[in-house]
Amino acid sequence: MQLQFPQTEKQRKQLEHWEAVKEQGQVYYIIKTIIILLCTYEFGWVTWGYIYKRGWSHTPARFSIEDIIIDIVCGLVVGLWEWSSMQRKFEPRDPTKDRTMI
């Protein structure tokens, strides 16, 4: 169970990122992902409201709690997916538990 050393600059940066987020923990990483998605969503609606206010669009911005709930669920799924992807890529594998290599 030996961790492979990064071969390229991109892999080295990805490994450094993984080490940084691993210290913070999975819950913090997922919450940060949800907050980033919520802020992006809100920025989009504020921008759309500004466009409507300026008269560039005839459709007003509509804000609903269902959209926020969907955004939170999407942030949870994306956070878990990215975490498991990084974990699978950078954590050393135990050959006795690896069932893909038969």
Image (cartoon, grey):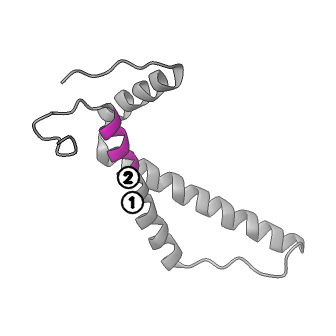
Residue found at the far front of this picture: 102
**Magenta highlight range:** 79-89
Q: Position of residue 84 (x, y in %)?
A: 32, 46
The quadrant in which residue 72 appears is: bottom left
Which of these two is toward me, 54 or 27?
Answer: 27
**What is the secondary structure assignment of the residue under circle 1?**
helix
Looking at the picture, which amino acid does disc 1 mark? Answer: Val
Q: Is 3 a magenta residue?
A: no
Which residue is drawn at the image coordinates 36% and 18% (left, top)? 5
Using the image, tell me which numbered label, if any, was put on residue 77: 1
Q: Position of residue 47 (x, y in %)?
A: 74, 63
Q: Main secondary structure of the magenta part?
A: helix
Tag 2 near tag 1, CB within 8 Å: yes
Q: Is residue 93 above or below residue 51?
A: above
Q: Is residue 42 above or below residue 16?
A: below
Q: Position of residue 27 (x, y in %)?
A: 30, 48
Using the image, tell me which numbered label, if any, was put on residue 81: 2
Q: Is residue 35 above or below residue 49?
A: above
